[in-house]
Amino acid sequence: MIRKAIIKDVPKVSEWMDLATLARLEITSEDPEHPIEFALNADNKFWRAAEDGEQTIRVLFDAPQNISRISLLFEENTVSRTQQFSLSWQRAGEAAVELVRQQFNFSCQTRRRSMRITSFPWSK
């Protein structure tokens, strides 16, 4: 028998980090009509690269941060394609550690893919 409980008072998830004040972002490409700042807001705007090919977005925090979740949304509205995504973290002066690598297939029927990451090697 599984142990379970019904909970009624679920605490609200804390607000998202304000990356504009906590970190510097580095990107390999940016469409001027869809800058990286758009990816940091929940207002249905989005970042888009200015050129095709592999892209990198780096979030460089000014000070160490406790991160408990990362939420990502990938959307493709124009062509069928395969999208590969990887997420890594790196402590200053150490080698990068890959957290996740995921491949998505987009078609006319599947325009959006989302991912929530809540397991991190530093939280074990």
Image (tube, grey):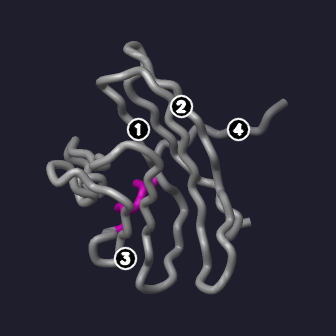
Q: Which mark is residue 23?
A: 3
Return the disc, 3 or 1, that comes first in the chain's sequence: 3
- The three-letter code of the residue at mark 4 reads Lys
Residue visible at 30% across and 53% down in the picture: 39
Q: Callout 4: 10 Å neighbours few (<14), some, many (20+)?
A: few
Quarter containing the C terminus? bottom right
Q: Which mark is residue 104?
A: 2
- The three-letter code of the residue at mark 2 reads Phe
Residue 88: x percent and y percent? 60, 61
Circle 3: element type: strand
Circle 4: element type: loop
Q: In the depicted view, which residue is nearer to us: 37 or 54?
A: 54
Q: Residue furthest left?
A: 33
The quadrant where residue 87 appears: bottom right
Distance in Å between CA atoms under marks 3 and 1: 22 Å
Q: Which mark is residue 4?
A: 4
Distance in Å between CA atoms under marks 4 and 1: 34 Å
